[in-house]
Amino acid sequence: MLTEPADEGEVDTDEVGSEEEGGILYFYNWSEYIAPDIYTQFEEETGIIVVEENFFSNEDLYARLVSGATGYDVIVPSDYMVAMMIEDGLLAELDHNRLENIGNLYPTFTNPPFDPNMGHCLPYFWGTSGIGFNWEDWDEAPGSWAYIFDPELAQNFSGQISLLDDMREVFGAALIYLGYSASTTDEAELTEARDLILGIKEYIHSFESNTYEDLMISGETRLSQGWSGDIFFAQAEDWNIDYIIPREGALMWVDNLCITADAAADPERLARAYQWLDFLNRPDIAAQNTNWVWYASPNAAAEDMIDPDILSYPAIYPDEETFARLQYLGSVGDAIEIYYRMWTEIKME
């Protein structure tokens, strides 16, 4: 279910029905990022209606909340954005005693650097950002970011390459290709990354985060920077489509379930939010979600119920050697203004 806010500042709770029975929970989520039947199951068990609205980048989510938008109960920011939101007081602190299923998580995810000891959020999905491609074009998989960022190679797919419409993701991939930290604050390194992206911009079909998998399915694009689960979603439509983590490394991300500080100010909204977090962390629900979305689950107790084809796919659950080449996106502090300026230069060029 989707709802549009009444204005730029708050969700219109009058348009979606009354709050009789279990009430309404407003869920601000990425597009196509939950198994649809889960909403019905939750409502049947609790009486709570979940209303979903979508954002398309962490920056969109942040801008909405920091500008004073109210009404959202649970949101799904990525790792580095969680750190920024904690600093800005946008997230509620979690009471772990209200989460019966919190013990289901892999230890790897219970003390993340962006949110120590899960003080504010629970991990929802994790995955990587790599390269989607079509086997019709390749004898061997394109194992390097060079096929996107080297102009001599990128020109072979001129007009058929898409990059995510996500500032940190695009800079992160370029920085990794150059051998730098994906979270650098060094302006010279960022300038080099900006120039690298500008150098291949003429070959780019689009910057797209919402429907790039559809462009791959239609054949309009042949190489895509993308999130692992989205590419596998496209693979279900065309088995020639595949995904690879480049040998230089890639971004590893964790998306998180967080209760807004706004919701925490209302005991009834807060209670519904805790029910929603705990429900999504139940093993059967977490497995159902992964089997539909095709992103790796941080829920260890769900493993026996996850499709074996997903668990055995190294691009979804990478081996230790590949895992060692992955980087988190970290907070870059005041250097974010450099990123914003250079991103505007890239998009406006």
Image (cartoon, rainbow, N blue to C red):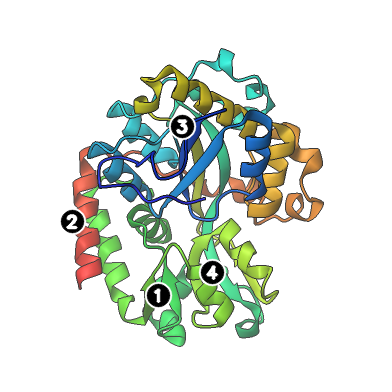
Residue positioned 54% across, 55% down in the render: 32
Residue positioned 46% across, 32% down in the render: 258
Residue 267 seen in this snapshot: yes
Q: Residues within 10 Å of mark 4 (few under 14, many from 20)?
A: many
**Where does residue 208 sit, x and y in percent of width and height?**
40, 67
Type of the residue with mark 3: Cys
Mark 4 secondary-structure assignment: helix
**What's the CA distance linking mark 1 and mark 3?**
39 Å
In front here: 187 or 41?
Answer: 41
Q: Earlier in the sequence, mark 2 or mark 1?
A: 1
Residue at image mark 4: 213
Label disc, if present, on residue 150 of the rendered structure: 1
Residue at image mark 3: 258
Q: Earlier in the sequence, mark 4 or mark 2?
A: 4
Q: Residues within 10 Å of mark 2 (few under 14, many from 20)?
A: few
Q: Residues within 10 Å of mark 3 (few under 14, many from 20)?
A: many
Q: Horizontal placement of 330 versus 289: left or right?
A: left
Mark 2 secondary-structure assignment: helix
**Where does residue 252 sit, x and y in percent of width and height?**
51, 47
Type of the residue with mark 2: Arg
Q: Residues within 10 Å of mark 1 (few under 14, many from 20)?
A: some
